[in-house]
Amino acid sequence: MSAVLERILYVEDDDDIRTLAGFALKAVGGFTVEPCASGREALDKALGFAPQLFLLDVMMPGMDGPTTLARLRALPGLEAVPAIFMTAKVQPQEVQRYKALGSLDVISKPFDPMTLSSGVRAIWERRHD
Amino acid sequence: MIESAAMEAETRDALRRMRADGVRRLGERVADLTTAWKTLTLRPWDAVTRTGIGELASVAHRLAGAGGTFGFPALSAAAAPLELVLAGLADSSAPDAERVNQAHKLIASLVAALECGASVLDEPPEPPSATPGEAADPVLVCTADAAQSGLAALVSNLGYAVLRGAAAPPPAQRMAAAVVDAALPQALDTCRVLSARCPVILLADDSSFEARLAAARAGVSAIVPKPLETNELADWLDQFASHRRDATLCILVVDDDSVLAETYAMALRQAGMDASAISDPSRVLDAIAGASPDLVLMDLQMPGIDGIELARVIRQTRRHMSLPLLFLSAEQDAARQIQARRLGGDDFIAKPVDLGRLATLVRLRAERARSLRAVMESDSLTGLLNHGRFKERLSLELHRCRREGGVVSLALLDLDHFKQVNDQHGHLVGDRVIRSLARSLQKRLRRTDVIGRYGGEEFGVLLMGTEAEAARAAIDQVRRRFTALPFETDRSRFTVSFSAGVASNAGPDGPAEAEALIEAADAALYAAKRAGRDCTRLAGEG
């Protein structure tokens, strides 16, 4: 019996990818999405947005995904917000590494915009398994 | 959520427009990067130039991310190592000619990737499912009618999950292989569609050259003539399925330039290999001992120790005689290439390196070396460990158990009345039976279990961390499936059973030495034969 996922804080440094994925999450998945172009922007917006889930690109200039996640989780009230990383195709052992860093799972890039939302939702619903 | 078909169409349109925008911007970004790079290479090497190159490294990083998203995976594959090389250059106090050349080459690859056009975007290359599936992918069976449904049962009997259908399953469905009956209407069209997703095996009535050519043009990887020879189909399925399941190839890269070493390693990783890079040649023996690579890729010209000397050092160890060595070399030194070949250099790759070609060549060499090694250590009929190697492993594992504690069970299996099979059906059919049992054991046991062909019709299985009772259950499961598996010849249809004896090293009195354990398992096997065959007995059981 998990809460329905609605609010996603999405961090991706590439403008075109952010536009595409952000739109797909809104239009196909019906989510409320707060898109952020950097870890810094995410930290600024997170408290006001009250996200249920962080969706983070791994490799970003400046602050990378794992660092951003650690700092987001240091904010009051966001300690237990689940996260999903997005990154280029990875080996199973790397997925394990990202999970150890506090991510529920990893969504590999390139992603299919039509099924991105159902992928996110499936991971969200599995999170207590 | 999308509530109606109209809305879905609208969403798809919007996405399509966004992708088109993304693709157009990709082109602009590549053009900007190319121009900026040209300008920078004409400038003196100063702080401004280096900062500019550092900025291009960030551009390359974004291109690596965006390329795949907008349907240009080849662009990503060139942009990711380009980022490394550019970042390395930005950090150097002088422009290293080799790195500059490599950057030129990679930028040319970006442009080429863009010109090749986008891959089809409505069928994304990767399913969006998050974690790569570790379970074996199913085999798709496409047959014309219900009479052929035996084929699905047969494939399932060989240990594969089966998907049935006359058409292509949804794009997210992964498949190890597809088996298509040529009797299906538009069979070759089906093959053409499926061949983009997995290897296709065609069951053909007509195996003439013309038919084979038509099949090849439809992307068919293997043809199995009808009437169906089960083992031939099984061999192909094993090959295709294991191709995906095989452990990742492990490659060691040695180049004194750490940036280039890491660049090559990254290209190999992107091609699905497990690559590590070292820039200190004197560490090569440690690195080989640590990683047991399938292949070593090294620079021929390195200051201090050069590649030829390094090859000589590697070959001084007997175990490394067959380790493939691939050299990276500038084209002008033909004489040294001959010298390097004399020392067992297997091939040369010209610098600046074409990373796509590098990955292909490395994979081919490493796979070939792997399969040769497997042939040397295995029984030629079954591909299992041969008698000598099996006993070696048994001693090794028992030794480990004595040292670290732990339990293993040894099962010895012997086909029942095998001589009659040979007498009635001939040795070729007998060989088929032996291979089938080998395959059943491989399919149904865990990958950590060690399987050997112990003698003519006798097999040995070493089940790690398994008590005797559990080992019996595992062997019995194989036995029941195998006994039910029918063999067909032109004239008849028959089944074969086997008997098995199991012994483990568990308990204070458990046999700790290989000979004693073999003796105990052999006695149990004899008891199983005496009890009427087609059963499994434990050592010490009445």
Image (cartoon, coloured by chain):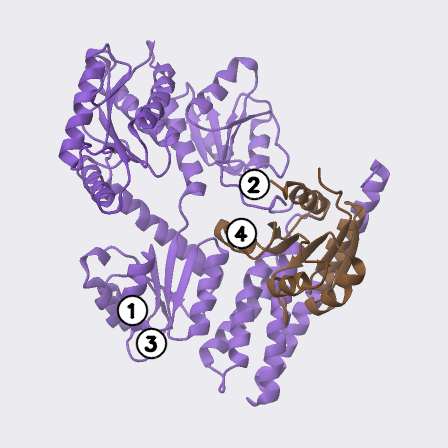
Residue at disc 3, secondary structure: loop
- Colour assignment, chain B: purple
Q: Which residue has dot 3 on it? A: B302
Q: Amino acid at mark 2?
A: Ala
Q: Which residue is mark 2?
A: B196
Residue B486 visible in rendering: no
First in sequence, mark 2 or 1: give its number. 2
* Residue at x-position 46% and y-position 36%: B221
Q: Residues within 10 Å of mark 1 (few under 14, many from 20)?
A: many
Chain brown in the figure, letter: A
In which quadrant of the rendered image does the N terminus of chain B lie?
Answer: top right
- Distance Cα–Cα, label 4 vs label 2: 27 Å
Q: Do discs 1 and 3 share a chain?
A: yes
Disc 4 residue type (three-letter): Val
Residue identified by numbered label 4: A95
Res A87 visible? yes
Q: Amino acid at mark 1?
A: Gln
**Residue at image location 63% in from the left, 82% down from the top:** B39
Q: Dot 3 falls on which chain?
A: B
SS at circle 1: helix
**Is B486 on the left-hand or right-hand side of A87?**
left
Judging by the rendered image, the residue that carries numbered circle 1 is B337
Closer-to-camera residue (B167/A43): A43
How far apart marks 1 and 3 lie (CA) works out to 14 Å
Of the two numbered discs 1 and 3 in the rendering, the one whose residue sits closer to the viewer: 3
Image location (x, y in percent) of residue A78:
70, 58
Q: Chain of mark 4?
A: A
Q: Is residue B193 above or below residue B96?
A: above
Distance CA(mark 4)–CA(mark 1): 41 Å
